[in-house]
Image (tube, helix red, strand yellow):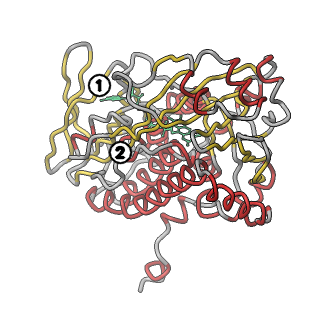
């Protein structure tokens, strides 16, 4: 399909992570030729598990991605919240078939490398998508016809003309500097991650509380720990979150997990034993980007995903938001390819309130999940009185969000008034 006014006009994307690959697929589906530049020699994901909620799986389904993910994903039956101190269940949000019925798309958990590989295989087969590796987007110059992007490759800088530069280059984004955005900041929180074999001895001791068919979250004033199956159920992803200080520079590093064990020292025995048996963790200092920072330069550059709004993962929505951004952006540009400034303004109008609400939800989760004393007692009491339906209804705005509805013209405009 050709797009009126944009024939031969490329979309240049910086970064082949979840945001950039989804954008490449979404723009190609709208008929735009895409050049996707990835700094790494081989595009790949770091980290382990990912929860993909229905708001994201709905979009991936529309883009034809799920077929490639089938074998790697698990559809958990529920998210179960427990107190770390005594492992008592305090709430259960039913997923499985109920998620499908309620939010019209499945809730999935998977290894992020499997999602990345699925997106990459779809993008690489699309005739309009060119993926250029070992290529770092360095700068951009704007002119009335679009944008000229400077890309460094093999020690040389190439210049390429494009209709639009999409910055999908993550939390340390260079494109954010191009649009005049803020630097990312350390959130004061550390993520601890590990992966265990599902049939390992370490898992056996906690199997009654850490079910293979659920997402389990253990809450404690000093930490919380989330676990779910990945790799079709053969492995278990564990991510825990504590307060902490930046230790050196860099994104992640290995640790024996001593600070995490100290934070959860008074956890119930099965959980404490699990932590004792894991001696290798990857530590990630969590950095965020102020969501009010600029996302666009009207001459032709725009940010999506973590580049725009890296958030703490307490609502498990960073990748989902990146997927939403990519889909909405491709649609707004396809609707107005001759007026990029208007298309980017519409993208921001749709995405900013949504991202702000998701960030607020993450902060709310962090507050309630780490509550102590009377606040924790009230939390447990309130959750205990909520029906299954009420607990699920709390997520309707988040998981029921449909990008196509958000993109639909307002009724008055549809009626031509
Ligand atoms: C512990 C933890 C748990 C999480 N759990 C969840 C979850 O359950 N569900 C969920 O939805 N989200 C989750 N998230 C968030 C999610 O992982 C991120 O929001 C998402 O991966 C961001 O994707 P991205 O493509 O925007 O950025 P990235 O994955 O960082 O990709 C950026 C890409 O750009 C490349 N790049 C960088 N600079 C340049 C340049 N100048 N030129 C070219 N290429 C460049 C990089 O090499 C990289 O490939 C979690 C995050 C953490 C830390």
Q: Which of the 4 image quadrants contains residue 353?
A: bottom left
Total marks shown come to 2
Residue 28 coordinates in the image, percent (x, y): 45, 42
Residue 92 coordinates in the image, percent (x, y): 77, 52
Which residue is nearer to you in this view: 67 or 98? 98
Residue at 41%, 86% in the rendered image: 417
Q: Which residue extends farthest right?
A: 208
Q: Does 154 sit left or right of 333 as displayed?
A: left
In the image, residue 291 above or below residue 190: below
Q: Which of the 4 image quadrants contains residue 276?
A: top right
Q: Does 25 sit left or right of 368 as displayed?
A: left
Tell whether circle 1 marks a residue whose Cβ is less than 8 angstroms from ligand 1. Answer: yes
Mark number for residue 74? Answer: none
Which residue is nearer to you in this view: 220 or 57? 220
Residue at 22%, 32% in the rendered image: 160
Q: Mark 2 points at which residue?
A: 289
Mark number for residue 136? Answer: 1
In the image, residue 3 above or below residue 17: below
Disc 2 and disc 1: Cα gap in Å? 21 Å
Report helix, strand or loop for mark 1: strand
Say which label, 2 or 1, has the lower sequence index. Answer: 1
């Amino acid at each position: 399909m050709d797009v009126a006014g944009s024939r031969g006009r490329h979309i240049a994307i910086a970064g082949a992570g979840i945001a950039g690959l989804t954008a490449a697929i979404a723009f190609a589906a709208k008929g735009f030729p895409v050049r996707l530049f990835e700094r790494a020699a081989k595009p790949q994901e770091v980290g382990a598990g990912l929860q993909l909620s229905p708001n994201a799986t709905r979009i991936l389904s529309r883009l034809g991605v799920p077929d490639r993910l089938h074998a790697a994903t698990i559809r958990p039956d529920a998210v179960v919240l427990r107190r770390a101190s005594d492992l008592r269940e305090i709430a259960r949000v039913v997923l499985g078939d109920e998620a499908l019925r309620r939010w019209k798309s499945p809730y999935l958990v998977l290894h992020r490398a499997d999602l990345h590989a699925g997106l990459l295989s779809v993008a690489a087969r699309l005739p309009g998508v060119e993926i250029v590796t070992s290529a770092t987007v360095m700068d951009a110059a704007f002119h009335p016809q679009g944008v000229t992007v400077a890309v460094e490759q093999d020690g040389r800088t190439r210049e390429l003309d494009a209709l639009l530069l999409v910055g999908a280059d993550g939390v340390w984004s260079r494109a954010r500097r191009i649009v005049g955005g803020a630097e990312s900041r350390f959130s004061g929180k550390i993520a601890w991650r590990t992966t265990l074999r599902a049939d390992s001895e370490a898992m056996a001791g906690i199997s009654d509380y850490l079910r293979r068919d659920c997402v389990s979250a253990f809450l404690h004033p000093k930490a919380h720990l989330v676990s779910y199956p990945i790799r079709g159920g053969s492995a278990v992803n564990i991510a825990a979150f504590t307060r902490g200080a930046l230790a050196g520079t860099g994104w992640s590093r290995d640790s024996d997990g001593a600070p995490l064990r100290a934070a959860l020292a008074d956890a119930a025995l099965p959980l404490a034993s699990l932590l004792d048996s894991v001696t290798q963790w990857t530590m990630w200092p969590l950095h965020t980007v102020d969501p009010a920072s600029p996302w666009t330069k009207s001459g032709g550059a725009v940010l999506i995903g973590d580049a725009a709004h890296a958030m703490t993962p307490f609502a498990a929505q960073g990748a989902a938001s990146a997927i939403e951004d990519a889909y909405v952006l491709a649609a707004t540009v396809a609707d107005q390819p001759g007026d990029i400034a208007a298309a980017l303004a519409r993208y921001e109008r749709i995405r900013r309130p949504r991202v702000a609400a998701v960030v607020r939800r993450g902060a709310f989760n962090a507050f309630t999940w780490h509550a102590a004393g009377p606040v924790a007692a009230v939390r447990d009491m309130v959750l205990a009185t909520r029906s299954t339906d009420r607990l699920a209804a709390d997520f309707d705005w988040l998981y029921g969000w449909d990008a196509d509805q958000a993109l639909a013209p307002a009724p008055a405009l549809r009626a031509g008034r």
